[in-house]
Image (spheres, helix red, strand yellow):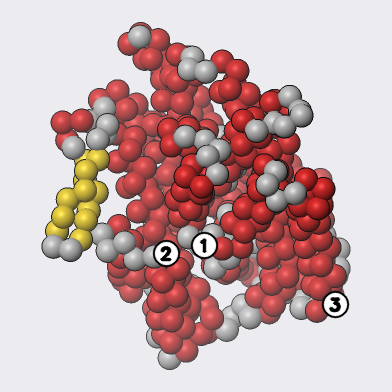
Amino acid sequence: MADLAKTSSTDLLISNGDIVPLSEAVKVWARVAALSFGGPAGQIAVMHRIVVDEKRWVGEHRFLHALNYCMLLPGPEAHQLAIYIGWLLNKTKGGMIAGLLFVLPGFVSILALSYIYVLFGDLTAIEGMFFGLKCAVLSVVIQAVFRIGSRALKNRTMVAIAAAAFVAIFILHVPFPLIIITAGIIGYFGGRAGVSAFKVGGGHKSGYGKILEDRDSVLGESIPLHARPNLAWSLKTSGVLALLWLLPVAALLLTLGPGNVFSKIGIFFSQMAVVTFGGAYAVLAYVAQAAVDQFGWLRPGEMLDGLGMAETTPGPLIMVTQFVGFLAGYRDPGLMSPLMAATLGAMLTTWVTFLPSFLWIFAGAPFIEKMRGNAALEGAMSAITAAVVGVILNLAVWFGLHVLFAEVQQVAVGSLRIDIPVMTSIIWPSLVLTVLAAVAIFRLRMSVITTLLISAGLGVAWTMTAS
């Protein structure tokens, strides 16, 4: 790796080879995937720690530039970020490998848990495992908020944008897209005017150590040859991906008809992949309403169980849709066995949910890379990232309310309604486990996996004892 670090920007621009060895990239992306717990905040933090801090493959500003673009896209931003960076380092095959590995552990984990869910029902040990894991995940998400915030909130202006975003979404219930658009407009004009607060790298450094400059990374500052805009390549690649995404859905419609459960799954989750902006929780509100009320695929409590699976397994939180597709097939198997129909439902849901992420990245990333360094665009993206920190904090607070308290009530403040916990409903075992997990992560510097395993064991022990 030392030789790689000496590669000049000119060499990278001329060369069309891999920036890092593909075998090494596969190991790293497999590691990122295995450690990607705690939702997008936790997943992005893990990716940053490994790809930027440890491997030094890409610099801080390039990482944030890619993240900002992914934040603007529908679908799971952490998954898209993995594809983007994998593509930068190892061309199309690198993006495909990074994206597939990012999803695979979560798919296998949730599929296994789904089998247990429908075959064995409410087992005390399983309930205890989920109980302990949820408490640990809350601590992991809080750590991720600090880590991402320390990188993105470079000055008081960015802190103010993050705070305003939190107030807007948590108290004023402003839609996420509107928050992002507003932050982008503010940042665009701030960057265009040359305001230092909106410059990438401006302001104070984070408390997590020295920032890795792009020029000091393996990738360097220049654009690799394969990452330069190529309209013919973008159209060809995007066309193939669009066919892989939509042809199976069209085939289901033609052969099974629009009323079949698999046709409904294909159409609904394909639509979701296009229109769902705002992160996993915004998506879940949309999915839950349709899956429960419109299609009747599952019950409200089961949607929360699915969220628990997604929160406590590696991969994007939106993997909960796989559980929805699983139950949809299980309860409407047609001529197949329920388990076979459930498995096919889970696979179809995962396919149409995540394949579009590859399309969005391969279609737009080369043009976004070319615009890196544009002051107005960088200002817009920096402001958007700051706003997203506030939104992620909102998600952490929402998660904390539902993990630590049995009851949450809405209090009217004028025309506003704010969620606050009923203090007498605090779940003391959850609070104790969450504090222990926080001590393990923040004080003892334990790894995420170790913390999760210990918390799961303590959760099982408590549940078995209490029962």
- Please state, as top left, top right, bottom left or bottom right, where the C terminus lies in the image: top left
Q: Is residue 181 left or right of residue 372?
A: left
Instruction: Tell me if I can see residue 29 in this picture.
Output: no
Q: Which mark is residue 232?
A: 3
Q: CA distance from mark 3 to mark 1?
A: 28 Å
Which amino acid type is marked by label 2? Phe
Horizontal and vertical percent position of residue 255: 82, 48
Q: Are marks 2 and 1 in contact (CB under 8 Å)?
A: yes
Which residue in the protein does label 1 denote? 277
Residue density around tag 3, few if under 14, some if 14–19, many if 20 or more, within 10 Å: few
Which residue in the protein does label 2 denote? 176
Q: Reply above or below: 165 against 396.
A: below
Instruction: Tell me if I can see residue 197 in this picture.
Output: yes
Q: Which mark is residue 35?
A: none
Q: Is residue 38 left or right of residue 250?
A: left
Q: Tag 3's secondary structure?
A: helix
Q: Nearer the viewer, residue 201 or 458?
A: 458
Q: Reply above or below: 97 against 214.
A: above
Which amino acid type is marked by label 1? Phe
Q: Nearer the viewer, residue 406 or 142?
A: 406
Q: Name the image quarter holding residue 213.
A: bottom right
Q: Tag 2's secondary structure?
A: helix
Horizontal and vertical percent position of residue 320: 55, 41
Q: Point out the frontmost of discs 3 and 1.
A: 1
